[in-house]
Image: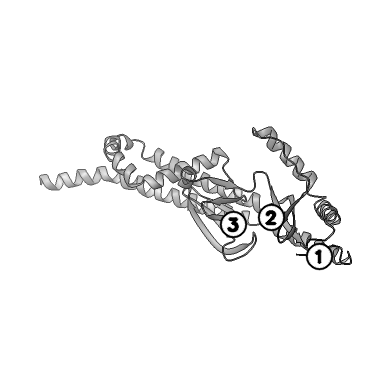
Amino acid sequence: MGNGLWHTISAWFLIPTVVKFAGTVGGILVIVAITHAIQRSLRRLENNDNRYRLRKFVNAFGMFAAIVLVLVVFSDKLGNLTVALGVAGAGIAFALQEVIASIAGWVALSFGKFYSAGDRVQLGGIVGDVIDISVLRTTLMEIGQWVKGDLYNGRIVRVANSFVFKEPVFNYSDFNFLWDEITVSIKHGSDYKLARDMLQRIADDILVGVVPEAKKAWHGMVDRYLIEDARIEPKVTLLLNEKGIEFTVRYVTDYKDRRSTKDKLFTRVLEEIDSTAGKIVLA
């Protein structure tokens, strides 16, 4: 009799908890359904950047709503968990230290302006474009390796966000331009003055549209950082060695156009040399 009454009373008190649990699960399912419906509707947006950012915002808002729902429903039960969580905290922190570091890295990425989605970065030995930043990982579309030039090789790389605390982060997109060089060697006895003027003219012609934009971006860098002003216009320098006369053309180009810029420069160089009637001969 006593045992039966005790089981009845226990079951009676468990009913509210079961109801709350069921209601919480149902609420979370509703939030997930709404989140997925909104994300499907975002596919209609043509702008990739806006679509990506809105999708991330919807995900974050859905997670926040689910957490708030759990806290509200079980607010009267949370006090009993304080002591247990305090005891288990040290063990949990040790076991999940890499996860905690990655979450801290995500916070640093969100507010520290290390890089953002769409930037081209180098994390350790990995170079690629950032295509997603989640709470734990940064996802890159890798560049290089067996592919020459700054071109995609097709591999997706996921790097823990804790990386930002361990290694340097190289961002190609902060300035949007890079200094690059080509070298052209001509034989001794060639008209080196004509060659210098030719190379300078070629670089000025091909990069005429890049220099003004690069100057504008560089002025922004000078205002933002403690950095000296730098030459943006193309420059040709000469080096004499036993193999011939070596010219170096230094110039600024968009970080996504390095390969195509070199192609244009070398093509024009060959065309111009062919038109000199032997005054300039490649070494």
Of label 2 and label 1, which has the lower sequence position?
Answer: 2
Locate residue 12 relative to residue 217 in the image: left or right: left
Residue 280, relative to residue 130: is it above or below? below
Label 1 sits on what residue type? Val
- Type of amino acid under label 3: Arg
Query: In the image, what residue occupies the spot 14% across and 48% down?
Result: 4
Q: Position of residue 139 (x, y in %)?
A: 53, 54
The residue mark sitting in front, 1 or 3, is 1
Local secondary structure at mark 1: loop
Q: Which mark is residue 200?
A: none
Question: Where 90 sits versus 129, above or below?
Answer: above
SS of the residue under disc 2: loop
Give the residue type at disc 2.
Answer: Lys
Q: Residue furthest left?
A: 1
Mark 1 and mark 2 in contact (Cβ < 8 Å)? Answer: no
Marks 3 and 2 sit apart, C-alpha to C-alpha, by: 31 Å
Above or below, 134 relative to 153: above
Which badge, 3 or 2, is on the more N-terminal residue?
3
Residue 90 picture location, percent across and down: 30, 39
> Which residue is drawn at the image coordinates 20% and 43% (left, top)?
9
- Residue hosting label 2: 256
Residue 216 on image: x %, y %:
76, 40
Q: Which mark is residue 281?
A: 1
Q: Real-space Cα distance between discs 1 and 3?
A: 61 Å
What is the quadrant of residue 73 in the picture? top left
Residue sitting nearer the eye, 242 or 8: 242
Residue of label 3: 40
